[in-house]
Amino acid sequence: MHSYLRAIGFGAISKEAEAEKILDETFYDFTKREIAKGENNTAFIQMCKEYAPNMGIMIYGNLDENGFHRQHYFPYLTGAQVSTKDELTIEKRVDGISYAGVCEDGRVGVSIIFYVQNIAQYQRETFLDSVFRKSMSATLSGLSTGGMVLLPVKKDMDQISRQQKSTAKRNQLLSAAKNGDEEAIESLTIEDMDLYSMISRRMYTEDVYSIIDTFFMPYGIECDQYQIMGNIRQCESVVNTATDEKVYQLGLECNDLCFDICINEKDLLGEPEVGRRFKGNIWLQGHVNFE
């Protein structure tokens, strides 16, 4: 059974047999269906059913003369805005039935790896040999099974303005460093050393969450799971139509990267509001946009 079903409001499901009933409902009463050419004269079919606005369950598999053969299923959340356009590549995962998106985004400081949601569309684009001629962007989203709400760091307008200028300057240096600019690399090294020294001094008298506004870093052994802390820019509560469980959908800004997450009300400690911060672990997904 998929461990992130509870993130979209299926927290009461504890057995695979219970999950199968939901998957049968998704297959026979889907909200949307996508079809692509499969291997050995089969059709690849991907279906999804919404159980609340922008979230639900996706299943996919192959269709041949013997019927539909499900390969995998996963809960999903559809993001509301384009998150990144930087150096996006798509790679097949080792399981052979899904894809991972890899993005080198300088704002985060690490390679962003996410689970691709729209597999059938990507396979169609690849079959038409047009994906290599199109630019791609990604709309990121995350599912969380545990998190907490933190109060924001108080800042005045001058501090916000200085931080925005500093962030813009750092992004320029990162871009130059990627292109081999030795001066930019040296500047970033010195900046990191100064930052480490500053944090080390302040840690003696301040709480770490009053020093660090946001962070985005890998978590665990899975390449598409992260621990994050981000500012809440949007907050909405929805109800799963099958279970009546309440789910929070949060729009976050994390290291200047914007994306949406969802979390079951039972798994969230604190009351989310715009302006506060969310800290937790997420499974990162993404919808690849072909432009």
Image (cartoon, rainbow, N blue to C red):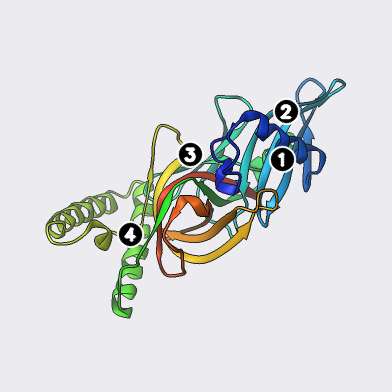
Name the residue rendered at 72%, 44% in the picture: 48
Element assignment for label 4: helix
Q: Which residue is mark 2?
A: 70
Is residue 218 found left or right of 74 in the rendered image? Answer: left
The residue mark sitting in front, 1 or 2, is 2
Residue kind at label 4, given as amino acid type: Arg
Which of 181 and 87 lies nearest the eye of the viewer?
87
What's the CA distance linking mark 4 and mark 1?
35 Å
Mark 3 and mark 2: Cα distance apart in space = 23 Å
- Residue that label 4 marks: 170
Q: Is residue 31 visible?
A: yes
- Residue neighbourhood size for the residue with mark 4, other residues' Cα within 10 Å, grouped as few (<14), some (14–19), many (≥20): some
Upstream in the sequence, badge 1 or badge 3?
1
Q: Which residue is mark 1?
A: 125
Q: If you read the primary sequence from the N terminus, does the residue marked by circle 4 or circle 1 appear first?
A: 1
| Mark 4 or mark 2, earlier in chain | 2
Q: Position of residue 116 (x, y in %)?
A: 60, 41
Q: CA distance from mark 4 to mark 3?
A: 25 Å
Amino acid at dot 2: Arg
Which tag, 4 or 3, sits closer to the chain's start?
A: 4
Amino acid type, mark 3: Asp
The amino acid type, in three-letter code, at marker 1 is Glu
Q: Which mark is residue 224?
A: 3
